[in-house]
Image (cartoon, grey):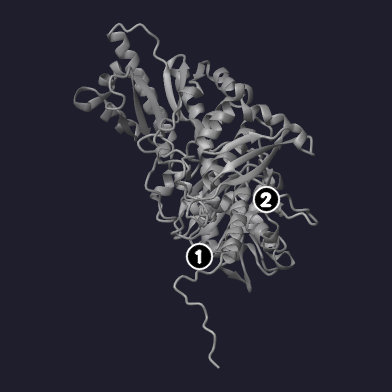
Amino acid sequence: MNKLYIGNVSAEASEEDFEAIFDQWKIPHNSPVLVKNGYAFVDCPDEKAAMKAIDVLSGKVELHGKVLEVEHSVPKRQRSCKLQIRNIPPHMQWEVLDGMLAQYGAVESCEQVNTDTETAVVNVRYGAKDQARLALEKLNESMMENYALKVSFIPDETAAPEGPSAGGRRGYNARGTSRSGSPSLGARPKMQSDIPLRILVPTQFVGAIIGKEGATIRNITKQTHSKIDIHRKENAGAAEKPITIHSTPEGCSNACTTIMEIMQKEALDTKFTEEIPLKILAHNNFVGRLIGKEGRNLKKIEEDTGTKITISALQDLTMYNPERTITVKGTIEACARAEEELMKKIRESYESDMAAMNLQSNLIPGLNLNALGLFPSGSPGMGHSMSSIPPPGAHGGCPSFGGHPESETVHLFIPALAVGAIIGKQGQHIKQLSHFAGASIKIAPAEDVGAKPHRVVIIAGPPEAQFKAQCRIFGKLKEENFFGPKEEVKLEAHIKVPSFAAGRVIGKGGKTVNELQNLTCAEVVVPRDQTPDENDQVIVKISGHFFACQLAQRKIQEILAQVKRQQQPKPTSGAQPPQPRRK
């Protein structure tokens, strides 16, 4: 990725001119510079030199009256899913950047490039070519905190999507590591992966893992550059204790392997004959994607690593313990390979969920996302985030006039073939989903739907309950492969609004509904010539991906709340009735 394209070159420019410029700015390069009509190519010896040329010259240096444009030279066949974004504001938070990038598609990796500039540079891989192209069109030259972003393709040697890399590549590091050390982008507080590795170990081996006066655990921590918490006081008297490992993905894997080796040696020394499997704890939100439809993802990991993998039952979960136990049996080497693959899938799911959440979290009115408990926290493990879920009735959604959030009803259209997956065996899934979300969830009878390929899920509950229930339904459809691997789940939702308020949703000349669509990326339609139902209500149709649908629903509820407030009679307490005027 060291060949550069130089654009906006004057017809008078020569090879010697470019040699002089590169020498003047002390930019290493390989001669000769290939000068064409209106453009030129130059090879740099390494990425650091190439980045310096882009930073120093592009848009800043003039040659024969023309300001040069310098970027990576990318053959057409390699203009695929990878972009480089430069000139990012130095104090921009990563969460804001993640949310901005996620607007244009699924971000598979985002890696910071080490440069000497004040502003930051990242390399981004999208899940599909059209997503990368859209991001390039929308973000290039767009202003952010008075900085004009510079976006260009970079060579995608595979020309096919691949998962985020665990380690760095030639001069730039994977998500997490270089970011926190960088002066730019409001450095993250932690250098490790956002998702820790959580494992269960037999209680009798905890002493050996800690070592005399803590020497063994200190040695593991030092060698693997990790922070390791052994939760000895949890589950007093239990046969197993959880261990949480905070590090880079590689550091977590190395620490895990070392712990398995210590346990095996201790088992030999104490003549412990039972098999010691690797047990990984994972938040239930990620397990469906880890398993895949009909268990395909899990089977592939088993085949690739030569292990046997089982996962604890859903029934073992509680609101305060949302973790499932993944048991891996095999040799230490095989278990270590399986751990890498399993955690890679879990981290990808987490990154995807967080990017989606960050995208709209500050835009959705009347919704307390922190109280949802949808995304695990990393402290001390992934098992405590659910305790932040408020009890029923404590949601902080759009208030009704009594001060409590009103229950809303949403009709969500799903593929008819997906009904079984949503209901689950003997109705277990829909019951658990209803309990988890705090919502009433029912499947409308087939005859109630005009469009036969679809069935309607009727969800009733306050805003947070709607968010959680719909989130899991969207996720379930993705997990069960009702949408393609690179296809975004898009569904249609219907909500009812009072007929007198429909005009406010549409706005004068369609202004409000157009603004809604532009803001939310959802399609919002109020069908014309509707006959109001027995409650004098009409339907608003909302179509789009999960966050688009959520934002549109919340914005429409906000409009309805405004209309209701305006219709409330003005308080007249203490006011005297008007007295007749004396003649």
**Quick one: 186 or 432, which is closer to the camera?**
432
Where residue 344 sits in the image (x, y, percent)? 51, 32
Q: In this view, does 30 lie to the left or right of 535?
A: left
Where residue 565 sits in the image (x, y, percent)? 56, 63
Residue 496 has which mark? 2
**Which residue sits at x=35%, y=20%?**
201
Up-down: is 340 above or below 457?
Answer: above
**Quick one: 69 or 253, which is closer to the camera?**
253
What residue did someone put label 1 on? 145
**Which residue sits at x=58%, y=62%?**
562
Q: Earlier in the sequence, mark 1 or mark 2?
A: 1
Residue 421 has which mark? none
Q: In this view, does 418 lie to the left or right of 184?
A: right
Q: In this view, does 74 lie to the left or right of 394?
A: right
**Quick one: 203 or 260, which is closer to the camera?**
203
The residue under label 1 is which amino acid type?
Glu
The residue under label 2 is which amino acid type?
Lys
